[in-house]
Image (tube, rainbow, N blue to C red):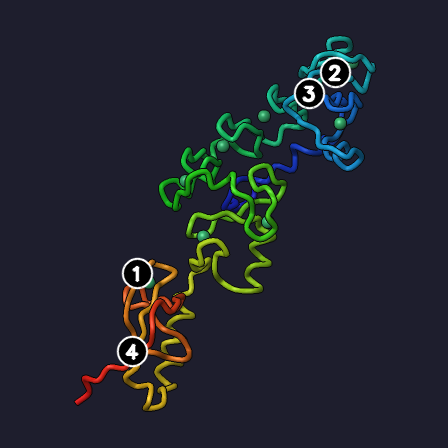
Amino acid sequence: GRRAALPQGPPDVSALLRFSSPRTAPRAPCCDKLYTCRLCHDNNEDHQLDRFKVKEVQCINCEKIQRAQQTCEECSTLFGEYYCSVCHLFDKDKKQYHCENCGICRIGPKEDYFHCLKCNLCLAVNLQGKHKCIENVSRQDCPICLEDIHTSRIVARVLPCGHLLHKTCYEDMLKEGYRCPLCMHSALDMSRHWRQLDDEVAQTPMPSEYQNMTVDILCNDCNGRSTVQFHILGMKCNICESYNTTQAGRYKISLDQQ
Ligand SMILES: [Zn+2]
Ligand SMILES: [Zn+2]
Ligand SMILES: [Zn+2]
Ligand SMILES: [Zn+2]
Ligand SMILES: [Zn+2]
Ligand SMILES: [Zn+2]
Ligand SMILES: [Zn+2]
Ligand SMILES: [Zn+2]
């Protein structure tokens, strides 16, 4: 059945890798060996199979080797209810679709996704017009594990700043902190936490020698600059009220107290 909630990022592409009940074995263009599964090839060999270069397949039923196609030309075995002639993917119909802009097959249904040309990736339709576009973001490697995201078997998470992480790496990141490792924007809605911090700040007056000390800060969330009173627990952006800020200048002691 269908999941109730759409995944945030581009869908898992794991079906591209393992033919669930293979009826055909594509011939690896690199080493001329027959493999029913790209992953098995990649695990057994010291190189990766380039799916786009597959030209021939062998029928598991009659063993006839022939050009890559959906149905065996000898015994009429249907190699896959789904067949992509670009990716040479043979599989059950799992509502896959080939996205021409992504250049690969993704798990659909197609109508649940759109391809954002600027981010250069397929996203859930509920993000259309509601995400921060970053030029070619899908071609950047994951900032946590430094591995590819675009063709990854792991679902990607889109952060509010528009950057992408593998879902698993995102979960690791949350154990360490709340900020995008690339741009330091808050990766979660922190507003409740900030309002708690407001209370703590209010209950923790700084010693009198610090009362007139101000500092310039740069906000990692809105990129605004403000000058605020120095506080050991955190310094709140005057513009968006986030505490995700960094000190951007020296401390200043104001002398205008009466
Ligand atoms: Zn090979
Ligand atoms: Zn056959
Ligand atoms: Zn395809
Ligand atoms: Zn796409
Ligand atoms: Zn976009
Ligand atoms: Zn990662
Ligand atoms: Zn970011
Ligand atoms: Zn701010």
* Residue at (28% x, 64% y) in the render: 239
Q: CA distance from mark 4 to mark 1?
A: 19 Å
Percent x, y of residue 119: 44, 38
Label 1 beta carbon less than 8 Å to ligand 8: yes
Badge 1 element: loop
Mark 4 vs mark 2, foreground winner is 4
| Position of the C terminus by quadrant | bottom left
Mark 3 vs mark 4, foreground winner is 4
What mark, if any, has residue 77 been given in the picture? 2
The disc labelled 2 sits on which kind of residue? Thr
Badge 4 element: strand
Q: CA distance from mark 3 to mark 4?
A: 67 Å
**What residue is disc 3 on?**
54
> Does label 1 or label 3 sit earlier along the sequence?
3
Percent x, y of residue 164: 50, 47
Direction left: furthest residue: 258
Q: In the rendered image of this protein, does residue 146 appear above or below residue 209?
A: above
| Position of the N terminus by quadrant | top right
Label 2 beta carbon less than 8 Å to ligand 2: yes
* Residue at (39% x, 67% y) in the render: 246
Badge 2 element: loop
Relative depth, front residue between 96 and 216: 216
Mark 1 vs mark 2, foreground winner is 1
Q: CA distance from mark 3 to mark 2?
A: 19 Å
> Does label 4 or label 1 sit earlier along the sequence?
1
**What residue is disc 1 on?**
224
Label 4 beta carbon less than 8 Å to ligand 8: no
Q: In the rendered image of this protein, does residue 174 appear above or below residue 89?
A: below
